[in-house]
Image (cartoon, helix red, strand yellow):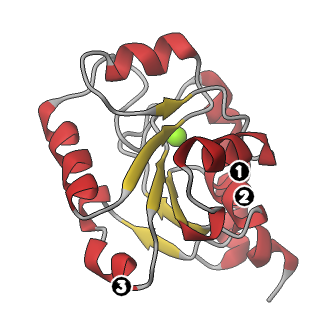
């Protein structure tokens, strides 16, 4: 496998979060899901979690997974998004560095090799989890609109996707 693939090739690509085969991952012994927020759960301009997304997270939990919203965004953004729910979250995750992943491991009480990571960006979600040997799922961004910092990453992302032949 090329270095590029080792660093950036998702273990699985999903069109939609709803397509996740929970039973299969359960069977394989996975115990927790690290869920990116912006453009994975909701577009960045959606301030509050909706019922459909809450139900989806409940479904993950009922299937026996611990769920953590794992975001590089601020406490204000993530805190406002989950307000009124009991969904645990970790903000300023500093993806793709190992820092947030190690905090997540501690917070969840689940070893990283038993975690699945889900996110919409190669340069943060996928790179970060591949480096930590976490099963990495890439979901297509929900909307074309990104925050300014993300737009910069998308430019490189498109190049990497092309090189990977994806
Ligand atoms: Mg994202």
Crowdedness of circle 3 by 10 Å Cα count: few (<14), some, many (20+)?
A: few
Most foreground residue, 86 or 162: 86
- Callout 2: SS: helix
Q: Is residue 79 above or below residue 20?
A: above
Horizontal placement of 5 versus 20: left or right?
A: right
- Callout 1: SS: helix
- Callout 3: SS: helix
In whole angstroms, how far apart are the C-alphas of marks 3 and 1?
29 Å
Answer with mark 2 or mark 3, whichever residue precedes in sequence: 3
Residue bearing the label numbered 1: 123
Which residue is found at the position 34% from the left and 64% from the top?
A: 15
Where in the figure is residue 96, as x and y percent of width and height?
75, 47
For the C terminus, give its image quadrant. bottom right
Most foreground residue, 145 or 64: 64
Pointers 2 and 1 in contact (C-beta within 8 Å): yes
Residue bearing the label numbered 3: 27
Q: In the rendered image, which quarter is residue 2 located in?
A: bottom right
Crowdedness of circle 1 by 10 Å Cα count: few (<14), some, many (20+)?
A: some
Horizontal placement of 39 versus 127: left or right?
A: left
Answer with mark 3 or mark 1, whichever residue precedes in sequence: 3
In whole angstroms, how far apart are the C-alphas of marks 2 and 1?
5 Å
Residue with the most extreme right position: 3
Horizontal placement of 104 versus 85: left or right?
A: right
Which residue is found at the position 66% from the left and 34% from the top?
A: 93
Crowdedness of circle 2 by 10 Å Cα count: few (<14), some, many (20+)?
A: many
**Front label number (3 vs 1):** 3
Residue bearing the label numbered 2: 127
């Amino acid at each position: 496998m090329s270095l590029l693939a080792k660093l950036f090739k998702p273990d699985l690509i999903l069109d939609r979060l709803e397509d996740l085969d929970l039973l299969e991952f359960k069977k394989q012994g996975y115990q927790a899901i690290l869920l990116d927020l912006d453009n994975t759960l909701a577009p960045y301009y959606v301030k509050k979690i909706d019922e459909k997304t809450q139900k989806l997270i409940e479904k993950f939990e009922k299937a026996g997974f611990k769920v953590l919203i794992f975001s590089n965004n601020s406490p204000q953004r993530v805190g406002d998004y989950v307000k009124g729910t009991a969904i645990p979250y970790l903000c300023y995750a500093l993806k793709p560095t190992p820092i947030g992943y190690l905090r997540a491991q501690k917070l969840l009480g689940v070893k990283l090799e038993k975690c699945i990571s889900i996110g919409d960006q190669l340069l943060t979600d996928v790179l970060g989890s591949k480096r930590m040997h976490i099963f990495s799922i890439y979901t297509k961004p929900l909307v074309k609109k990104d925050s300014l910092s993300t737009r910069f990453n998308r430019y490189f992302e498109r190049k990497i996707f092309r090189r990977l032949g994806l």
